[in-house]
Image (tube, helix red, strand yellow):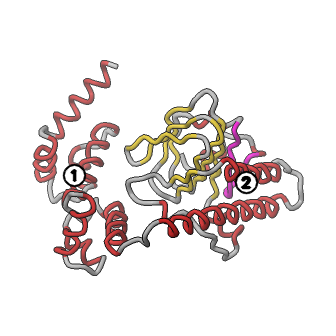
């Protein structure tokens, strides 16, 4: 679901149309089994555990866990513990831009990469600070007859972002004080993974990524091998395989359409690639998966 679709499912006192939605702990269980996409998501867990799926990976977010996901992969709310207390804030670009008015507090970029969810582990005190900001924002949203309701909400959102930025800056400084500054190789590795996530469907050759990073293919291969124990080609291949198996398993797209989405020159080339790395043809994989679904 998009932000607009979600807003229609929650009380009007929790949102500003076409701007922002704040889901408080009492309403949070309504997110179960819902997938959210095309929207920035802030998630704060104060008690219990919520299980979310992103990028084909299950993540268990426990108390004092905080997520700031930009317009990234869809996030699906898979399971929630009975004692769960959590907040979910979904502002769109327009609301964020209006609230911050050119200000750019620290974001959680240093906590993000393609294969790990952008999760901050907070102390109890830090969790209380962020929750208090969310409570202020909720109180402003509930003032539906207030002449300056939108402006109040923007003010409290700005305050939340400043508190979040402060926490991240302190965590970043503490990390830099106790660990070595990120190496050149780590930067290359991180930027390579970001490029793969963005372009893997259309760009299958190492040369493309090396050129984007202003490196030779040989140097990029050496760095990736040292950091991940695998070649850049293997990283790209794994992304393609993950996406292909997901589409075969969860959609009714034809194999021809899947091959086209993943930019294979023809369906035969895709089928050969899939069978080589999975030991089974796409048709057989889908057939077996269908049998598994029918027997559940």
- Tell me if residue 277 is in the magenta stretch: no
Up the image or down, 260 lies above or below 275; here it is below
In the image shown, does 12 or 135 lie closer to the viewer? 135
In the image shown, does 266 or 186 lie closer to the viewer? 186
Q: Which residue is mark 1?
A: 259
Chain part drawn in magenta:
14-25
Q: Residues within 10 Å of mark 1 (few under 14, many from 20)?
A: many
Up the image or down, 194 lies above or below 73; here it is below
Please, what secondary structure does the residue beneath circle 2 have?
Answer: helix
What is the x, y in percent for residue 293? 32, 25
Please, what secondary structure does the residue beneath circle 1 have?
Answer: helix
N-terminal label among 1 and 2: 2
In the image shown, does 231 or 137 lie closer to the viewer? 231
Which residue is drawn at the image coordinates 75% and 54% (left, top)? 133
Q: Look at the image and tell me in which quarter the C terminus lies.
A: top left
Q: Residue furthest bottom?
A: 214
In the image shown, does 85 or 174 lie closer to the viewer? 174
What is the x, y in percent for residue 30? 62, 34
**Position of 91 compared to 190: left or right?**
right
**Position of 245 compared to 114: left or right?**
left
What is the x, y in percent for residue 81? 57, 30
Query: Quadrant of residue 157 in the image?
Result: bottom right
- Tell me if residue 20 is in the magenta stretch: yes
Which residue is drawn at the image coordinates 56% and 34% (left, top)? 32
Which residue is drawn at the image coordinates 64% and 29% (left, top)? 83
Q: Residues within 10 Å of mark 2 (few under 14, many from 20)?
A: some
Q: Which residue is mark 2?
A: 129
Q: Are marks 1 and 2 in contact (CB under 8 Å)?
A: no
Which residue is drawn at the image coordinates 19% and 69% (left, top)? 222
């Amino acid at each position: 679901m998009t932000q607009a679709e979600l807003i229609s499912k929650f009380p009007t006192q929790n949102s500003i149309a076409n701007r922002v939605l704040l889901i408080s702990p009492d309403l949070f269980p309504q997110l179960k089994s819902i997938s959210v996409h095309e929207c920035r998501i802030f998630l704060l867990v104060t008690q219990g555990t919520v299980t979310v799926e992103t990028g084909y990976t299950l993540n268990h977010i426990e108390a004092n866990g905080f997520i700031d996901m930009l317009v990234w992969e869809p996030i699906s709310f898979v399971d929630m513990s009975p004692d769960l207390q959590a907040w979910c804030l979904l502002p769109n670009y327009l609301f964020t831009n209006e609230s911050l008015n050119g200000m750019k507090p620290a974001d959680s970029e240093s906590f993000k990469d393609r294969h790990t969810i952008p999760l901050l582990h907070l102390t109890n005190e830090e969790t209380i600070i962020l929750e208090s900001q969310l409570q202020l924002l909720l109180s402003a949203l509930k003032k539906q007859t207030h002449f300056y309701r939108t402006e109040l909400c923007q003010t409290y959102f700005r305050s939340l972002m400043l508190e979040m930025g402060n926490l991240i800056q302190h965590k970043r400084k503490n990390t830099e004080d106790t660990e070595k500054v990120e190496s050149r190789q780590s930067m290359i590795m991180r930027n390579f993974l970001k490029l793969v996530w963005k372009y893997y469907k259309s760009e299958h050759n190492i040369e493309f990524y090396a050129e984007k990073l202003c490196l030779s293919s040989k140097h990029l291969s050496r760095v990736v091998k040292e950091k991940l124990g695998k070649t850049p080609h293997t990283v790209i291949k794994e992304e393609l395989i993950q996406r292909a198996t997901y589409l075969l398993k969860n959609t009714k797209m034809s194999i021809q359409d899947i091959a086209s989405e993943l930019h294979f020159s023809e369906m035969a080339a895709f089928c050969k690639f899939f069978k080589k790395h999975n030991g089974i043809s796409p048709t057989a994989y889908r057939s077996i998966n269908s049998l598994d679904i029918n027997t559940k």
